[in-house]
C-alpha cells in the first residue's frame, strides 16, 4: 500500500528487510520471533503525507478499511492540534498511522 521499494540490506545477511521511502529515508524491519508482540493501536508505525485525501482514495481503491483513533471505520480523526490521521492494519495485523503533519 505504501509502495516502498525493498533495498539491499548491506549491513548483514540477517532476515532484516530494508525499505526505501526516497531521499535516503529507510525503514528497517527486524524480525524477533522469540519476543512477545502486542498488537494494539497504541503501538503503531506512523508516516506523514501532504495529501491525506489521496491516501484515503488509494486505500478505498484497494478495499482497505481505515479507522479513526476511536475505531470508527472509514473516518478521519482530527486531533486537538488540528492534525488529521487515519489508521489501518498491515497484513500481519500491525497498525499503521497516516497523518497530515508535514511541519
Image (cartoon, rainbow, N blue to C red):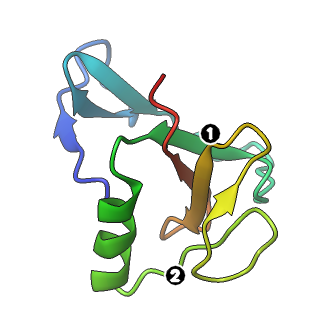
What mark, if any, has residue 23 been given in the picture? none
Q: Is residue 29 above or below residue 52?
A: above
Q: Is residue 23 left or right of residue 91?
A: left
The residue nearer to you, when weighing 47 against 82, is: 82
The image shows residue 29 at horizontal and vertical percentages of 46, 37
Q: Is residue 70 above or below residue 12?
A: below
The residue nearer to you, when weighing 42 against 52, is: 52
The image shows residue 95 at horizontal and vertical percentages of 62, 58
Q: Secondary structure at mark 2?
A: loop
Residue at 32% in and 17% down:
12
What mark, if any, has residue 65 been given in the picture? 2
How many tags in the picture?
2
Where residue 13 sits, quadrant-wise, is top left
* Residue 62 in view of the camera: no
Q: Is residue 29 left or right of residue 57?
A: right
- Badge 2 crowding class, 10 Å Cα cut-off, few under 14, some 14 to 19, many 20 or more, is some
Residue at 64% in and 47% down:
33
The image shows residue 84 at horizontal and vertical percentages of 59, 51
**Residue position marked by numbered label 1 in the rendering:** 32
Compare marks 1 and 2 and give the one earlier in the sequence.
1
Residue at 81% in and 54% down:
38
Q: Is residue 83 left or right of residue 99?
A: right
Q: Could you tell me how far apart the alpha carbons at marks 1 and 2 are, in whole angstroms?
A: 28 Å
Q: Is residue 9 above or below residue 5?
A: above
Q: Secondary structure at mark 1?
A: loop
Where residue 66 sits, quadrant-wise, is bottom right
Q: Looking at the rendering, in which quadrant would you find the N terminus?
A: bottom left
* Residue 98 in view of the camera: yes
Residue at 60% in and 54% down:
85
Amino acid at each position: 500500500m505504501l509502495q516502498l521499494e525493498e533495498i539491499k540490506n548491506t549491513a548483514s545477511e540477517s532476515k532484516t528487510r530494508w525499505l526505501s521511502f526516497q531521499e535516503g529515508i529507510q525503514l528497517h524491519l527486524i524480525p524477533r520471533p522469540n519476543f512477545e508482540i502486542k498488537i494494539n493501536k497504541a503501538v503503531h508505525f506512523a508516516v506523514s503525507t501532504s495529501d491525506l485525501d489521496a491516501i484515503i482514495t488509494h486505500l478505498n481503491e484497494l478495499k482497505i478499511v481505515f479507522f479513526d483513533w476511536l475505531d470508527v471505520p472509514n473516518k478521519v480523526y482530527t486531533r486537538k492540534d488540528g492534525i488529521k490521521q487515519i489508521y489501518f492494519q498491515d497484513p500481519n495485523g500491525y497498525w499503521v498511522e497516516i497523518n497530515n503533519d508535514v511541519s
